[in-house]
Amino acid sequence: MAELLTGKVALVTGAAHPRGIGQAIASALNDNGATVVVTDLDGAEGLTQQGGLACDVTVAAETEHAVATVLQAHGHLDILVNNAGVGIGASDFLEITDKEWDISVAVNLRGIVNMCRAAIPHMQANGGTIINVASLAGLGALEAIPACYTASKFAAVGLTKQLAAQYADSGIRVNAICPGSVITQMHTQAMTLLAQSRGISMEQAMAEEEAGIPLGRSAQPSEIGATAVYLASDLASYVTGVALPVTGGMTQGL
C-alpha cells in the first residue's frame, strides 16, 4: 500500500486507550508514513515510534507545550487530530450534574479550541489539516445519549466549520469525523445507558443498535483510522468544512 503521508508530522490527542479511536487513528497515520506524536492525560508512551506526551487538553499551557515539543523535535506540524473526548452524564437531562456539563464542554469543545489555538499559528505559513473527532450525536440527537455529550459534539462540529471558513485562505483544511457505533470502551458505556433506559439487557441493547445499522454491525476503530488517513492526505485536498458521518448508514436521529 502506498504511503500517503510520507514526510508529514501529526499530533493526535487522546490516544492512550488500546481500544480507542485515538490509538487507531495514530496507528493508521503511522502506517501511512506520517511521523506521529500522541498525547493523553497520563501520556501514551510507546504507542508509535515517537512515543507520547502527557497533555490535559483543557489546560492551554499544556496544549501549547505539546505543540512546541513537536515543533522542536520535528520542525513542523502538518496534521492535528483532536480526538480527546469524554462521554459522561445521565441519559435523563435533569439528572446531569453541573460538573458533568463543565467537564463535557471543557474536554469536547474547549480542548479542541486550546489545541487549535496552539497549532494554527504554525500552520498558517505552510498549510495543514485539522481533524476533529466529533460524533453522530453531533449531527442529531440519539436515544439515551447524555445531553451534555450531544451539545458539546454539536459545538465541535460548529467550530470545525467556522475554522474551515476562516483559515481556508491559509491552506488549512478543517474537517470533522462523526463516528456512529464503534467498538471502543465508550461503546460499552453507551450500551449500558441504553440498556438501563430501556430496562433491557446489554445483549438486547447491542442487538437493537445493530438492527438500526444498514451495514449490520458496529465499526472497528481501524475504520475510523482509515477515514482520518483519507482526510489528512492529498486524496482530500479539496475537502474542508465537512462533518463526515462514518456510521455504516446509521441515521443521525432528530
Image (cartoon, rainbow, N blue to C red):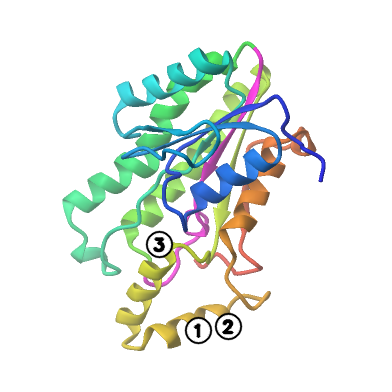
Magenta stretch: give its range.
126-144
Q: Secondary structure at mark 2?
A: helix
Disc 3 target residue: 186
Residue 103, image x and y in percent?
26, 46
Disc 2 target residue: 211
Disc 1 target residue: 208
- Front-lying residue, 165 or 23: 23
Circles 2 and 1, Cβ within 8 Å, touching? The answer is yes
Which amino acid is tagged 1?
Answer: Glu
Q: Secondary structure at mark 1?
A: helix
Marks 2 and 1 sit apart, C-alpha to C-alpha, by 5 Å
- Front-lying residue, 45 or 235: 45
* For residue 10, side relative to residue 18 (left or right): right
Marks 3 and 2 sit apart, C-alpha to C-alpha, by 19 Å
Tell me if residue 201 comes above or below residue 69 in the rendering: below
Tell me if residue 139 comes above or below residue 170 in the rendering: below
Q: Secondary structure at mark 3?
A: helix
